[in-house]
Amino acid sequence: MLVGAGVALTVTAGVMAATTDDRGRGPVMAFTGLERPYVTVLAVDVEPTEVSFVWTGNGDLYRVSVGDDLDDPVRTVVTAEPRAVIEAPRAADPNGRVGYRVEVVTEAGTTTAAVEGTLTLLPTAPSRPRVEKTTTAGAVVRWKPGDYATTYDVAVSRSKHKIPATVHRLTDGRPRFATDSLKPDTTYWIRARSVGEAGVSRFGPPVKLTTPPAETALTVGAWNICSQACSGYSGRVGPQSAQVHASEVDVMTLQEAGGKRVGPITRAHFSGGPRRLVMASGGGDSRYVLYSSDRFDQLGGGRWPLGHGRWAAWARLEERQTQRRFIVVSVHLLNGHDATGQRAAEMRTLMSALGAVNTEGDPVILAGDFNSGTHRRGDTVGPIVRAHGFRDAVEIAEQTAAAQVNTGSRRGDEAILSGDHVDHIYVSEAWTVSFWKQWAALSGTTYVGPWLSDHNMITATVSLPVLDESAIEPSATEDVAREAAAPGSAPPGVSTPG
């Protein structure tokens, strides 16, 4: 960047002939050895870390000084060549303007001619932005200001290493950028460069941010694994846990999963997997909740006695990315066709206990073996659940798989295709259900493969919308080309002081 202004020329006194030119040069001056000293600056080239000067003159030595106070400069170079390179000074006004002087000097250090001007330093690159806020469609970032910056250009890219051809120039000059034009669940790289009177800096280092998804989607499962009431658990637990991990559930509820003696076996096999499942604290009495440690934090949990020797385990989870909280309950009600009244009492107790811990109305999933369904005459559990705003995932799912298979009964190796379900995943009103599946290994209507339990595992993929977000007011910008210079900055070329 070539700049310069405000030149003053000083000379020493001497005898000049009438035939000399306006610089005191001519045959008489040359003959007498009294040619007037002169210096003319041809170019001042400003780079990020240095300033280059080129001049013409008739001195044997030249002194180049840069600084706010040229009588006490911050940088000085003495050279016999008509050019010099000086480290870019730090002493400048807020817009980067600083004075310079090129002098013809004698060996004694006295000045015989001098030219002065003003140069403008390039702005320094800003720091890596800091993310202040992200929403599903926007973000706010800030950075430490660059020296001599009057405003900033911001590049938003899907690549860490590529800068788009068009960038956004801020019109208010603040070291802050806000946008509401991003896509949900998408990773971006945002970087800024300084714009000053002399031009633009390089782009500073980028910051990576990922917008949260527009909804919290997860797969939840329920399975009565019959660990102790059915024989051969030690041979079944491996294939059972392999099926759970293969399903890639994010949250899993287990029933009849073992107590103090068998519970540790269940924990060891069902923990881990591709979702890094962990047992929620507070579970027990053969009812457990497992959740993906990669996605969720547990905020609370425990278990409730329901009467008749029955329990329910619960956990309050929060998804880290969207900070969406919800409650999962692992349910196992009393069995028996003649226990309708007892199950109804257990369900009312469960709803009362749930209400006591869910004072803020978090979304809820009730999953497990309810020993009840619409196929059972006089069923009261379903009506109680629905009266509290819950729906059966299989009934509202956009797609289902093996929904016609009875979840808890078979005739030998033959599936009962009655659509009777005693195992359910009930969801509160905030949830939507995209897919419900029963894990029944069938060839036609015949079960194949090893027998794993007297119930089939069921899963449902459910979603919650994001919480209401405070709107982001986007920064006022104008689009400029990536190669654009600063507005009004001097074009490359020779600057003539004066």
Image (cartoon, rainbow, N blue to C red):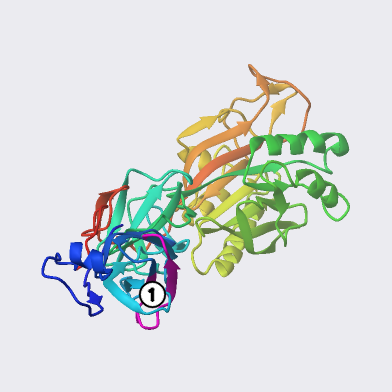
Q: Is residue 133 left or right of residue 296?
A: left
Quarter of the C terminus within the rendering? bottom left
Residue 389 visible in rendering: yes
Type of the residue with mark 1: Thr
User: Percent from the top left, x then y, of residue 81?
Assistant: 40, 60
Q: How many marks?
A: 1
- Determine whether 196 is above or below 91 in the image: above
Farthest residue in the left direction?
A: 18
Residue 248 in magenta stretch: no
Q: Nearer the viewer, residue 438 or 492?
A: 492
Name the residue beneath numbered marker 1.
106
Residue 150: percent from the left, percent from the top? 29, 67
Q: Say whether residue 279 is left or right of residue 18.
A: right
Q: Residues within 10 Å of mark 1 (few under 14, many from 20)?
A: some
The picture places residue 256, in percent across and down from the top left corner, at 76, 47
Which residue is situated farthest in the top direction here?
A: 444
Q: As rendered, which of 203 and 12 lies closer to the eye? A: 12
Name which quarter of the figure residue 476 lies in: bottom left
What residue is at 48 percent from the left and 56 percent from the top?
A: 205
Q: Which residues are magenta?
A: 63-82
Is 71 included in the stretch rendered in magenta?
Answer: yes
State the SS at label 1: loop
Position of 397 relative to 487 (above/below)? above
Q: Quadrant of residue 442?
A: top right
Q: Quadrant of residue 490?
A: bottom left
Image quarter hosting the N terminus: bottom left
Nearer to us in this view, 488 or 344: 488
Q: Residue at x 41, y 64 (%)?
A: 124
Picture coordinates of residue 12, whole percent (x, y): 26, 79
- For residue 465, side relative to residue 197 (left or right): right
